[in-house]
Image: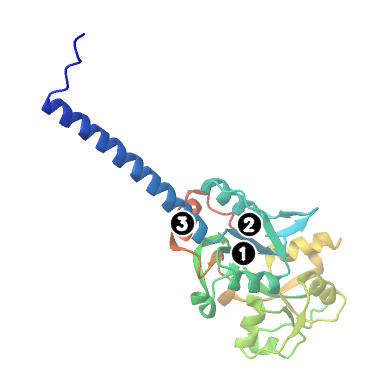
Amino acid sequence: MKRPTPPSAPAHRRLLTRRAILQAVATAAAGAALLRRARAQSTPPIRLITSEFAPYSFSENGQARGVVADRARQLLRETGRSVPIEVYPWARAYETALRTPGALLFPVARRPEREDLFKWVGEAIPFKVALFRSTERPDITPTTLEEAGQYRIGALQKDVKGIYLTAKGIPHEIIADEELGVRMLVHGRLDLLPSDIRSMMYRLHKLGLPQTAVTEALPLPEISRPLYFAFNRDTPDEIVEEFRRALDTLPEPEQY
């Protein structure tokens, strides 16, 4: 019986080369998989954090609703993620985002004192702010912020409007939420309330009050700027960039 002819030297070398290539590919694939797992383990989980700030974001029947919450869901779809949106009172939402890597806070005003506290993704929605008075108080007619300071003003704690008033030296009362503030305004327990137009109209509707119940007393152009999506500053840059690219693909938010 004839023995099989051994492969020639060149053929043998080709066989060894193919085996080496296959082994190298397999090793590289295994290494890449390990690297992906290591990165996944070291990357903080994404959390979406928002506050009770209707009509932009609010909780309804256990679900986050609102125009900015809807845009956040669009971002999740664009990035291929499925993450619940957590809704808290503003102060808790803000503090949670500050101390939680991977937390995306929205909507949040981009102020100089906050610039280095977050990694800013991009604009979420336009925002126009004014001081409002009860329509039944035509005697309240401030023409400057300094004149407004002589009246009773209410504002949320750690909210951009309250921070702004503090920075300008305008005394104000801390209120628990803006819906309470609207009640206090129309019932004469506050003289002025800073609010953006969308929120004010929404809360009047929710309280069963006509839009004519309040009147814009003094616009606040210095804080009438877009609200933002912002990540905790310890979030990896590649995640922030991924969400920036996703935001660029979304339609422009509704203007006033």
Q: Residue furthest top?
A: 1
Front residue of 246/41: it is 41
Image disc number at residue 159: none
Q: Nearer the viewer, mark 2 or mark 3?
A: 3
Q: Is residue 144 visible?
A: no
Front residue of 18/111: it is 18
Q: Is residue 146 above or below residue 97?
A: below
Q: Is residue 78 visible?
A: yes
The residue wearing badge 1 is 107
Q: Secondary structure at mark 2?
A: helix
**Contact between labelled residues 2 and 1, with CB atoms less than 8 Å apart:** yes
The residue drawn where x is 62% and y is 68% is 128
Q: Secondary structure at mark 1?
A: strand
The colour scheme used here is rainbow
Residue type pointed to by label 2: Val
Q: Quadrant of the C terminus?
A: bottom right
In space, the residues marked 1 and 3 are separated at their CA atoms by: 29 Å
Front residue of 1/242: it is 1
The residue wearing badge 2 is 68
Q: Residue furthest front?
A: 1
